[in-house]
């Protein structure tokens, strides 16, 4: 049986390698994740660190103190004519300040002076700029308050009975893990995408090309056939994971993560560790997809099944990720979720717990084997001939 | 030698085969003849061990197919309809794959490939991918695959469908030479001319039962017709 298993594996390997679609899904999906992450980080950082300070001011002359303060704090001011309609002008400016007519008079009288801040909350850049302007105005307001209190012989601290001090104990690696958690899903999915096309081609594809009958009349055990196909598909899943991890290792250092206050420097060793942690999942991914594709009569039908199926094992992992649940020991026993937890720990640079790794791995491998046995039963039954 | 004994097979409400018995001896070509839906393919699949008959049994060289399917299949070569090839593999890769499935080691495999290649004159096809082969070329590759492990018994399902005259002729010649070599050959067809020219023994199947059996000449005599086609139609319609 080993010889036959090897023959099947060899043939499926050659067949898949020559199939441009297999290679395209493998490479395309594997690179997609890291490329999207790189682009997203770069855009995020660019947005957060863009530090322009520009504000348009209408009736500049009404609030000389305020404008001087803004200029001192690095704002570029642009004067708007008194006839300009600010609701129209906001299209060309991120923020517009309009001191009230009696601004200086009210200030002198020690009563609240009004200044209007015009912004457009549907524009992220306008929101960010308005926040900066507001902070600067508030700061000046605070300064004025302190001066007034001192003039009245009151200590400015009296207006500030409580002061909150934040202390963040998350390490840079923890923060990195949080930011990179989106990346985990891409790695997990790569195990599925890598083998998807091979699984379909070796089962539903074989049926569609009418080569299945010729194969089933050979003196082979269904188990040998299925295991041979399974192992090759799992190999492609591993290629997918390896490619995704490698691409991450190459692309992530290019992302300006330091600007986000996190540091993540993947080393060949950490990439390899993650690969080992995820590797057993490839066996389940291939087994599950083969089982589903074996029920399909055509390539298209199988594609429909698998594109739906792909998200089923992701549900626990995504749920935990969205609900932001803390890691619990039982999570390692849930297929896919267990791998996600292991990956999360690896990203936090926690050295993997051997028991957790063994639990998670044995469970996915057993689940994969269960799929293989179910597929074998199908291959050995007459149902396999339906539609032929 | 293939022997089928009172085969019956039902799929849900459809009785695909009701009562089919036949004997295909060595050194002869036996034709399974019947209209579409008569139960030929189901009967053939029982012979190949892909389907388990509800009642009755098949033996291949005295091996019960249902009990020892793998031992029986080792003595069986099959050319399925549409040949069932992998378009991205070359002819040689096809032969190597199926030879290995039969457990041939490297040396035996190479010898077997050389043998079928010279038998079928497919040297020029050997290292080309099957993609783009003509129907005749595909048939030859399929046949080479079926003959690779030199099975004593050969089953062909409508092998001439889609073939041109030249390919049909070369297939016919090959089947005759296999018969001379003492092989047992069974093939299903509904092309009268081909069956008449080639078969020593005919089994007429209709509505899942054997309507008649005998040589083409015997069947003509039995029905009083000179043409096999007329005899066939009468046999199928008489019992209906």
Image (cartoon, coloured by chain):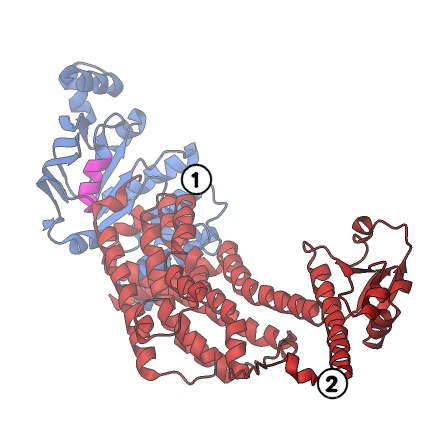
Chain colours: A red, B blue
Q: In this view, does A332 lie above or below A319?
A: below
| Residue stretch in magenta | B41-51
Q: Which mark is residue A63?
A: none
Q: How far across and how far down the image is residue B61, in percent?
A: 13, 49
Neighbor class of circle 1 (other Cα within 10 Å; few <14, some 14-19, many 20+) is some
Where residue A357 appears, x then y in whole percent?
34, 78
Residue topped by disc 2? A153
Whether residue A36 is visible, yes or no, is yes
Question: Residue tagged by mark 1?
Answer: B135
Question: Which secondary structure type mostly characterizes the magenta part of the structure?
Answer: helix
Q: Is residue A109 left or right of residue B18?
A: right
Residue lying at 31% horizontally and 29% vertically, measured from the top left: B194
Other residues around mark 2 within 10 Å, as few (<14) / some (14–19) / many (≥20): few
Separation of disc 1 and disc 2 at Cα?
105 Å
Question: In the picture shown, does residue A280 fall above or below A200?
Answer: below
Q: Does the magenta stretch include residue B149?
A: no
* Membership of B50 in magenta stretch: yes
Q: Mark 1 lies on which chain?
A: B
Residue at left offset 41%, top offset 56%: A311
Name the spot of residue A289 as percent of width and height, x first: 36, 56
* B51 vs B63, nearest the viewer: B51
Verify CB contact (< 8 Å) between mark 1 and mark 2: no
Residue shown at the point (48%, 72%) measured from the top left: A242
Q: Which residue is drawn at 79% across and 69% down?
A: A53
Q: Residue A8: in sight, yes or no?
A: no
| Quadrant housing residue A141 | bottom right
Chain for numbered disc 2: A
In the image shown, does B73 or B49 lie closer to the viewer?
A: B49
Quadrant location, the C terminus of chain A: top left
């Amino acid at each position: 049986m080993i010889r036959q298993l090897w023959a099947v594996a060899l043939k499926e390997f050659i067949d898949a390698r020559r199939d441009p679609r297999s290679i395209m899904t493998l490479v395309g999906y594997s690179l997609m994740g890291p490329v999207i992450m790189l682009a997203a980080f770069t855009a995020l950082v660019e947005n957060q660190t863009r530090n322009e300070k520009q504000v348009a001011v209408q009736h500049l002359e009404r609030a000389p103190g305020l404008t001087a303060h803004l200029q001192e704090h690095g704002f570029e001011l642009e004067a708007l004519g008194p006839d300009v309609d600010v609701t129209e002008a906001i299209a060309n400016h991120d923020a517009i300040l309009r001191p009230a007519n009696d601004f200086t008079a009210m200030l002198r009288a020690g009563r609240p002076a009004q200044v209007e801040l015009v912004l457009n909350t549907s524009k992220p850049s306008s929101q960010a700029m308005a926040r900066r302007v507001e902070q600067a105005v508030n700061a000046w307001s605070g300064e004025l308050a302190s001066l007034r209190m001192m003039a009245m012989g009151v200590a400015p601290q009296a207006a500030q009975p409580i002061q909150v001090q934040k202390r963040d104990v998350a390490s840079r690696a923890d923060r990195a893990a949080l930011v990179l958690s989106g990346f985990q899903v891409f790695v997990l999915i790569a195990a599925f995408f890598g083998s998807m096309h091979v699984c379909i081609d070796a089962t539903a594809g074989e049926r569609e090309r009418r080569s299945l009958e010729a194969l089933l009349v050979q003196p082979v055990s269904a188990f040998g056939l299925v295991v041979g196909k399974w192992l090759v598909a799992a190999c492609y899943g591993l290629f997918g994971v390896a490619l995704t991890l490698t691409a991450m290792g190459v692309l992530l250092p290019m992302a300006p993560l330091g600007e986000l206050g996190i540091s993540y420097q993947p080393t060949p060793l950490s990439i390899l560790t993650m690969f080992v942690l995820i590797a057993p999942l490839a066996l389940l991914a291939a087994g599950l997809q083969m089982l589903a594709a074996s029920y399909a009569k055509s390539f298209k039908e199988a594609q429909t099944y698998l594109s739906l199926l792909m998200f089923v094992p992701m549900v626990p992992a995504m749920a935990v990720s969205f609900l932001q649940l803390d890691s619990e020991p039982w999570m390692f026993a849930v297929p896919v979720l267990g791998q996600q937890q292991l990956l999360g720990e690896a990203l936090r640079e926690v050295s993997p717990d051997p028991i957790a790794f063994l639990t998670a791995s044995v469970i996915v491998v057993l689940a994969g084997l269960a799929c293989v046995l179910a597929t074998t039963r199908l291959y050995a039954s007459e149902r396999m001939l339906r539609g032929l | 030698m293939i022997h089928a004994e009172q085969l019956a097979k039902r799929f849900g409400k459809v009785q695909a085969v009701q009562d089919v018995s036949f004997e295909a001896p060595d050194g002869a070509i036996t034709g399974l003849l019947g209209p579409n839906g008569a139960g030929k393919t189901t009967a053939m699949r029982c012979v190949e061990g892909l389907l388990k008959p509800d009642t009755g049994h098949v033996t291949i060289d005295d091996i019960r197919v249902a009990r020892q399917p793998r031992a029986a299949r080792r003595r069986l070569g099959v050319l399925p309809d549409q040949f069932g090839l992998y378009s991205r593999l070359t002819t040689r890769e096809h032969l190597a794959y199926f030879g290995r499935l039969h457990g041939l080691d490297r040396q035996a495999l190479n010898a077997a490939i050389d043998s079928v290649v010279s038998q079928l004159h497919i040297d020029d096809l050997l290292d080309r991918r099957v993609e783009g082969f003509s129907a005749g070329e595909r048939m030859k590759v399929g046949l080479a695959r079926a003959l690779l492990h030199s099975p004593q018994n050969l089953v062909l399902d409508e092998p001439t469908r889609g073939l041109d005259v030249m390919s049909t002729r070369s297939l016919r010649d090959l089947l005759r030479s296999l018969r001379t070599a003492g092989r047992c050959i069974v093939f299903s067809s509904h092309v009268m001319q081909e069956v008449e020219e080639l078969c020593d023994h005919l089994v007429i199947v209709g509505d899942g039962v054997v309507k008649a059996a005998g040589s083409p000449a015997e069947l003509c005599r039995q029905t009083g017709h000179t043409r096999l086609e007329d005899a066939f139609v009468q046999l199928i319609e008489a019992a209906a």
